[in-house]
Image (cartoon, helix red, strand yellow):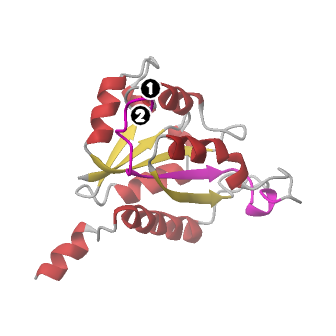
Amino acid sequence: MKTLIILDHPSYDLSVVNRRWVDEVRKYPDDFALHNLQSSYPRSSIDAANEHSLIDNAAAVVLQFPIFWYNCPPMMKAWIDTVFSPGWAYAGGRHLEGKPMALAVTCGGAQADYTPDGANAHTIEEFLCPFVQAVKRVHADFKGIYTFYGAHPADGSKPNVTELAASARNYVDFLHSLTGKAPAAVSEQLQK
């Protein structure tokens, strides 16, 4: 079973960080399955049965998105509303019970902006509290938040290439930690 990454980015073609993360994740096709909501549902009509099947067959689930006006992009919200349904996720359904789940988010602003004294007056954890509570409400095993700050530096520059590469490698490590599974390449080397 693979870790399923549910990706929503309304401007994916313009993304720097999310695209770099995806490029790194694609190096491990035996470990991760990417599911891009924008390309899967161009008309925004989410197929709950298909999404339920993907989740049922995943070792873990990660919701990856850029912070979008202190929230997730609209399609990710629609996905949560559709997929976390009564009878399947709660209220008689327990498909997500014990399933490792995490969030992976990118923030345009600097980390200092996401502090009580910063420009946004709150931490990223505070902004994401409703997502964490939703994961807990469906009895999934919340594993944390992986965050990249400074995706759109205030000076208009691009994120530092070295920091971006390190973030992508660390993201893969974070993803592997969700299930305790060693990367496929490492497992193969250990078996030799």
Q: Residue at x 18, y 81 (%)?
A: 190
Instruction: Give SS at disc 1.
Output: loop
Q: CA distance from mark 1 to mark 2?
A: 6 Å
Marks 2 and 1: in contact by CB < 8 Å? yes
In the rendered view, does 129 fall on the left or right side of 29? right
Looking at the picture, does residue 63 appear above or below residue 179?
above
| Residue 39, position as x, y percentages in the image | 40, 30
Q: Residue 183 magenta-drawn?
A: no
Q: Residue at x 53, y 41 (%)?
A: 137
Q: Which mark is residue 89?
A: 2
Which residues lie in the magenta part?
A: 90-115
Q: Residue at x 70, y 56 (%)?
A: 157
Q: Residues within 10 Å of mark 2 (few under 14, many from 20)?
A: many
In the depicted view, which residue is nearer to us: 94 or 23?
Answer: 94
Q: Which residue is mark 1?
A: 86
Q: Residue at x 27, y 34 (%)?
A: 53
Looking at the picture, which amino acid does disc 1 mark? Pro
Looking at the picture, which amino acid does disc 2 mark? Ala
Return the residue found at the far left: 192
| Residue 98, position as x, y percentages in the image | 38, 51
| Residue 192, position as x, y percentages in the image | 10, 82
In the depicted view, which residue is nearer to us: 80 or 157?
Answer: 80
Q: Residues within 10 Å of mark 1 (few under 14, many from 20)?
A: few
Q: Which mark is residue 31?
A: none
Instruction: Give SS at disc 2.
Output: loop
Q: Residue 93 magenta-drawn?
A: yes
In the depicted view, which residue is nearer to us: 143 or 138?
Answer: 138
Q: Quadrant of residue 144?
A: bottom right
